[in-house]
Image: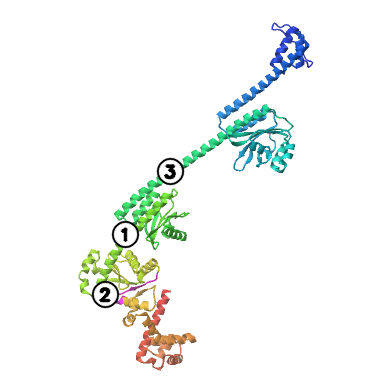
Amino acid sequence: MLDTGDGRIVVRTSEEGGPMTAETDSIAALLDAAYDPDLVEPTAVSRALQNIGVSELESSDLVERVGRSQRELSRLRRREHELSALFSSARELAELRDSDAVLARLVQRAHEMMGVDLAYLSEFEPDTLELRVRVTSGAVSESFRHLRVTPRHGLASAIVESRAPHWIARYDDYADEHNVRYAPPLHDAVSSEGLVSLLGVPMLSRDDVLGVLFVATREETNFAPEQISLLAALADHASVTLQTTQLLAESQRSATEARDALARLTEHLAERDRSNTVHQELVQTVLAGGGFGPVAETLTSALGRSVAILDAQEQVIAAAGLPVAATMLEPDEPTRVAIEDSRRSGHCVVLPGPDVRAVSALTAGGRPFGALLLGEGDFELGSVDLRTIERAAQVAALLELQQEAASGADHRVRSELIADLLDDVPERRSDVERRARRLGVDLSSLDAMLLLSVPGDQQTAAARTVARQADDHALVGEYRGFVVVAHSAQRSTLDPDQLRTHVESAIKHPISLVVPRSVRGALPDAFRAAMRTARLLTALEITGITADIDDFLPYAAILDTDARALNTFLRDTIGAVRDYDADRGADLLGTLRAFTRNNASPTRTARALNFHTNTILQRLDRLDHVLGADWRDDERMFRLSIAVRLDELRERLQSRRS
């Protein structure tokens, strides 16, 4: 039987089942006290020693030793528990998969092992120098879970700056001393949790602070060194976790950057391969003299998108990758602006689309020859692709120069042939037929002619435009300041009005086109008649029309077609009548026109104008006053008749052009 000191009586039995003796029971109590401090109180140890005959003096010393053993045993068992927890934490670090879960577990262990009310981990952000609460255990307020501590505020900043553990027994005293109350988010969060004592240790990585691990209680607490050491060990584990997380993040970023770099390299190599293929094919195109079609086909095949090549007049001269968008065939304003930008810079210009995605101007020596347009494709055009398009545009410009040189030579030959056909110099016409046969032209079939009155600096461009519209059996050339077309009326499909409109669009300038009568066997005569008509139109300052030679034949045959002389003639004959009408708002000129058309008969003139004969006689009297009394004489009447008819013709032509 044993008295444990708290009023309880414990009866022990031997292994055989009988009651134990007092001495045996005392020895058992001493053994229990040494094994587990919670089983036997110090007074029970003292009585047990007295029962086995130990003196009171010796008993006191032995009780003290037993107490020390009990305290050491408790410390060792607590240490064992801590080491076990640290070992588990280390194992979790070794098996790290989810850093957030590991950090949450570490904070939870600190909360449980240290017997505190709250534990939390604040991560340091080097960019803002703030400490952001990342994980909490035991927090009750939402504001605390999202707390950010600004630099130089609170206990956390002191720990970061000193890189050493800090603890405070009373938060209010510390807040008053360090003006923490002037940082409302921090003070409000701590107050809402009711925290009194706090302990924090830094999480370090060499010279860098990764964060701070905190524990806190809601009543005043003095933290022991063992507690600081334990929290520091957990903080080290948290540091390893954060470092591992950062390394993994950096590794992932590096892997992503490596994949991106590999993708860019692969794309660049693909661009280079496309560029090399295009370059080789373009070289073959130039050497083979294949024209613009192979250039467009090459780009379409390499870049997987529709391609259109326009000339300087925005006319399509080659296309590939059908169907081609309408904007590529007839450029809109943004596309024209991009062409101008490319022409100025010499580089390919990228557009937002959707129809035209890239534009590169065709230029050589500052001369514009057109543009190369590309549509939408399955991939974005890279820098190498853009340089490839620029090289293709350069090749197209070289082809244009090549064709221009060939066309220029052919144009000179055909112009010389036309000159020999239209000149009445037998010596120059001796081998005309032979030269015409070399060009594939049958002179006997040339039974129609068109003459274009074009400004001198635009004649060559106009002739080339006409040559592209005419067939190979026609002759187009320049002669005596005009562009002449000799062709077969049966074979040719040239429409005079359409041809004039097309040439005007190409050279951006109005022109006149004269259509003579059938010219079979009489090309020189037809040319001279057409030339006189063209000069008469120029003298009348009329342009932008298609004129039939028969309408002008009487005037072209008898009048000087110098513009100044013709204007002088009109001014001298009917200028006074025009001035009279302008000053008085009359229409004597209309009366004069009707009088000359009706054989100078006042009666027929009155009938034609639907006036009374006396009215016409009065107007004729006014004409006597304006023109002089002899204006009805034969010679003056002849001149006036020609003048009013020519003046009326000019007005009619101007009205028709409008």
* Label 3 SS: helix
Q: Amino acid at mark 2?
A: Pro
Relative to 94, does residue 155 appear above or below in the rendering?
below
* Marked residue nearer the N-terminal end (3 or 1): 3
- Which quadrant of the figure has residue 428? bottom left
Q: Quadrant of the C terminus?
A: bottom left
Pick the front one: 512 or 163: 163
Would residue 39 be seen by someone viewing this image from the given angle? no
Which label's residue is closer to the chain start, 1 or 2?
1
Question: Which residues are drawn in magenta?
Answer: 509-530
As drawn, is 195 to the left or to the right of 277?
A: right
Q: Position of residue 429 (x, y in %)?
A: 22, 71
Q: Which residue is mark 1?
A: 402
Q: Residues within 10 Å of mark 3 (few under 14, many from 20)?
A: few
Drawn side of residue 353 relative to residue 100, left or right? left
From this view, report whether residue 53 is shown above or below residue 168: above
Q: Confirm or deny contact between disc 1 and disc 2 (CB under 8 A).
A: no
Left-right relation of 223 to 288 = right
Residue 534: x, y in percent? 34, 76
Quarter-wise, where is residue 579 in the image? bottom left
Q: Which mark is residue 265?
A: 3
Tally of numbered discs? 3
* Quadrant of the image containing the N terminus: top right
Mark closer to the chain start, 2 or 3: 3
Q: Image point 25% across, 71% down: which residue?
A: 421
Q: CA distance from mark 1 to mark 2?
A: 34 Å
Query: For mark 2, what is the residue?
Result: 524
Instruction: Say what secondary structure mark 2 lies in.
Output: helix
Distance, label 2 to label 3, CA atoms, is 70 Å
Question: Few, some or many C-alpha atoms within 10 Å of disc 2 (few <14, some 14-19, many ≥20)?
Answer: some
